[in-house]
Amino acid sequence: MSKISETDILLNADGSVYHLNLLPKHISETVIAVGDPSRVSMVSQFFDDIEFEINNREFITHVGKFKGKKITVISTGIGTDNVEIFFSELDALVNIDLKTREPKPDKKKLKIIRIGTSGALQEDIALGSYLVSDYAVGLDNLMNFYDLPMTEEEAGIGKDLQKKTGLPFMPYVVRGSESLREQIGFDLVKGNTVTTPGFYAPQGRTLRAKTRFSNLLDDLNTFNKGDFRLTNFEMETSCYYAMARLLGHEALSVNAILANRIKKEFAKDHHRIVENLIEIILNRI
C-alpha cells in the first residue's frame, strides 16, 4: 500500500489529525455528530462522565460514557464541506496508521449518527416530530469530486429531480444505513432528506438578492417518483451518507423538525425538542 503524503493527511505536532485535533484513542465505535458546537454539551450532559474534551474552530469533541458505553460526540459546523473534513479525518483515525502514513490492512467500520435539525417540505410532517432519513438527496456539488457509486434507482431519482427543478446539474442520491435505521429510527417518521449548499436561495428563501430558481420550494414539495417523495431539507445529510458509502461506514441522520416550510410555521420550544431527541438516540445506541 502506498504511503500517504504529509500534504494529503495533515498532522499536528502531537500526532493528532489537523482539524479535529484527535488521536485514535479518542474515537469510539459509535460517534454522534452534531452541527451546532453548543449541542455537544447538550449530548454530553447525559454522560456518566466526560473523559476528554477539546475544541478547534467549529470542531468540538467530548468523549465519555453513557450507561457504561464509550461515546464520542463531535460538532462539525454547517455544511457538507465541513462534514467532508470531519468524515475524512474520522476515518483516518481508525483506518490509517498515522505513524507510517499507510492504510491499515483491516478496516474498521464506525457507526456515525447525526443529530440535526431540519425544515419539513410536506404539510403532513408536524413541528416537533423526529424524522429519520432513508435517502439523502445532495443539491451540493461535493460528490462531483468523488467517484460515488449509485444504484440505478438512486441515479433515476437524481435525473428526474434535475428535470423537475431545471437545475444545471444532477443531484446525487444515497441511501443511509438500513441497520442503524432499524435500530435507532424504527418508530420515527421515515423520510427522504434534501441537502442544500446554502440556507437561503438553495432552500427557496428570498431576501434582497435575486434568486434563479423561483419555484424550487414548490418543485421539491411536489416531486414524486412512485412512492418516493422529499420530506425535509437541511445542509449536511447527503455528505454523511455519501462518505459512509465511499469509506465503508454506517451512517444515519435523524432530524428534529423545527419548521414547516409549506405551512410557514416554526417551533418555539426548539431546545426541548432537540434535547428529547438526544435522549431517545442515546438510549437506543
Image (spheres, rainbow, N blue to C red):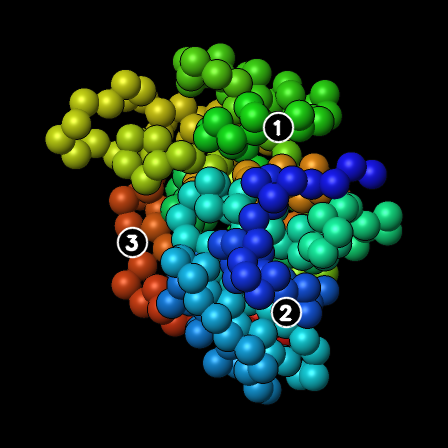
**Which percent across, then down, holds residue 181?**
68, 53
Query: What's under tag 1, amino acid-wise?
Result: Tyr
For marks 2 and 3 on the same chain, the one whose residue lies earlier in the sequence? 2
The foreground one among 272 and 207 is 207
Query: Left or right of 77: which side holds 251?
Result: right
Residue under label 2, please give it.
26
Which residue is at 68% across, 64% downward?
A: 24
Give the residue drawn at x 40%, y 57%.
Answer: 58
Upstream in the sequence, badge 1 or badge 2? 2
For mark 3, what is the residue? 266
Q: Is residue 278 above or below residue 76?
A: below
Disc on the earlier residue, 1 or 3: 1
In the rendered view, tell whether residue 238 sits above or below residue 178: above
The residue mark sitting in front, 1 or 3, is 1
- Residue 44 location (% of width, % of height): 51, 76
Q: Nearer the viewer, residue 188 or 66?
A: 66
Task: Report whether 79 appears left or right of 107.
Answer: left
Q: Which residue is mark 1?
A: 146
